[in-house]
Image (cartoon, rainbow, N blue to C red):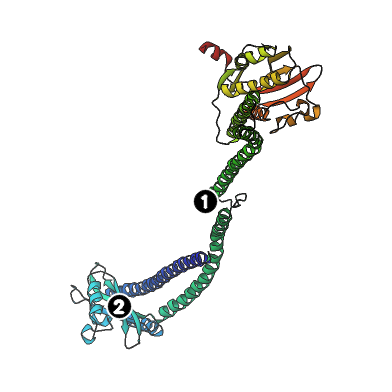
Amino acid sequence: MKHIFLRVVVYFGVVIVAFTLLIGLLFTQFNQSNIVGTYRTQLNDLAKTVADRVGKFAQTDDRVTFSNYLAAVEDFGSSRRSDIWIFSNPAAAQPLGEQFTNVVPEQLDMPDRMEFILSKAFKGKIKSYTSHDNIYDTDMMHVATPIFDNNKEIIGAVMVSGPMSMLSNTVTQYQKYMLLCVGLSAVLAIFLSLIFSRQLVRPILRIDEFAGEIAAGDYMGTTGIVRRDELGSLADTMDELAEQLAEAEEYRAGVEQSRRDFFSNVSHELRTPITVTKGYADALAEGYIDDPGKQAEYLRRIQDECQTMERLVSDLLIMSRMQNPDFELDTEVINLIAVAQDAMRGLRILMKEKGLHGEVTYDDEMSLIDGDYDRIRQVFVVLMQNAIKYCDQNTSIRVHITKSDGEIISTVNDHGIVIPEDEWDQVFDKFYRASTHGAREGSGLGLVVARNIVERHSGSISVTSDAEDGTTFTIIFPETSENVLDLESEM
């Protein structure tokens, strides 16, 4: 990242310094043009003034005054190292008289460009040019302007030649100041580029550091960058990525834990029935049991153990699926009364064998929830099977369903073995059996499966038990938001 920082500093510095140099050169050129233009205007004004006075002197034929004026003008020009030449226009109808001129063109060795601006002045135009003068050893500016008579006829021309040494000194001085300003600007530019580059690179460095944290498996942090630009958008994306990776890691850990729990549960619970089954089978296979009655008993026990293992594996698979984050319920609007009645009909034979009476009562026939029909039925089957297993003969199993404050509440009640109060919460733990249930068969997973199903439906399940009122499991589901009238119209 140091390379990026140095590159940004160099790029910023080069751009700002180049921009400063360009502005300096433009201003220098502009100032130089402005100084030259101002000086040209001054020479033009001087030439026009002389031309106007000479024109008037020529019209009045005031030679004495002209001589004095010419002497003053030449003294002025000499003091400023300037030449003021007055020419007669030979092409004019009444050219300027020789007594009003101070130079004869034929006696001068004029450069071509001087002859050119002089010829233009004879045509009524004001022209100028700059050249190096060997006599003064400096650059000179030459300006030529026409002399008019009263009839606006061009009778001559005035040419003023002025040195540009002072202008050159002024431009040079200005360039020195400008160079100083450019140097200071360059230093300031480099300083600012360091600051701006640091401000620009700092979030990049943080994003790079955060990416390293993510690569190392730490998804809990954030970039901490709040900006309203592309870097801010990138930082937000990195934060969102970390959050999604954290969720994915949590999901993966959940799946892995479910897998480990499943295999742990299977190995733990199947060890005993497999050992027992193998013992009975080995005894039969080795011929230790000759009595046909004993052999039949052993085979029946093997069959019972196999049924136990089958039921255990089925409960473990259901519990593992329910705990898997990928598991999805097939929800629809269902009537909890119909589900309870269906579950009880499936257990009528078992209830009849034990002389039990079952009934489903309700307060409102439209007790609707959003749920998976088969899973909710499984909850009632588990609770009713437990009631059949642990209740006394010739008693009743009652299911009652009611509404209260947007909830559907169902209870499953039986009279039989009482669950101690300090064990009410523990009966929903895996493989837990109440101390009062003795050695009665069961995997200890039925209530765990029931609780998982209920919680997947955003509900809750609890138990109370005493000798007078019996054992009561209470299930609470949120009532569906489906409009009951719309549902009835569809039916």
Residue 213 showing in the rendered view: yes
Farthest front residue in view: 290
Q: In whole angstroms, how far apart are the C-alphas of marks 2 and 1?
A: 72 Å
Mark 2: amino acid: Met
Residue 367 showing in the rendered view: no
Mark 1: amino acid: Leu
Q: Number of callouts in the render?
A: 2
Is residue 6 placed above or below 306 in the rendered structure? Answer: below
Closer to viewer: mark 2 or mark 1:
1
Is residue 13 placed above or below 396 in the rendered structure? Answer: below
Query: Can you give x and y, in whole percent of width and height, for residue 45 in the image?
Result: 36, 72
Query: Can you give x and y, in whole percent of width and height, for residue 347 in the image?
Result: 63, 16
Classify residue 368 by image quadrant. Answer: top right
Residue at numbered disc 2: 159
Per the image, label 2 sits on a secondary structure element best described as: strand
> On the picture, is 416 further left or further right than 451?
right
Q: Nearer the viewer, residue 300 or 210?
A: 300
* Mark identifier at residue 26: none
Q: Residue at x 68, y 12 (%)?
A: 358
> On the picture, is 162 further left or further right than 200?
left
Query: Can you give x and y, in whole percent of width and height, for residue 397 in the image?
Result: 70, 14
Residue at numbered disc 1: 234
The 10 Å Cα crowd at callout 2, few under 14, some 14 to 19, many 20 or more, is many
Per the image, label 1 sits on a secondary structure element best described as: helix
Query: Can you give x and y, in whole percent of width and height, for residue 67 in the image?
Result: 33, 83
Q: Residue at x 53, y 48 (%)?
A: 237
The 10 Å Cα crowd at callout 1, few under 14, some 14 to 19, many 20 or more, is some
Classify residue 153 by image quadrant. Answer: bottom left
Q: Nearer the viewer, residue 156 or 167?
A: 167
Classify residue 260 by image quadrant. Answer: top right
Q: Are marks 2 and 1 in contact (CB under 8 Å)?
A: no
Q: Nearer the viewer, residue 490 or 171?
A: 490
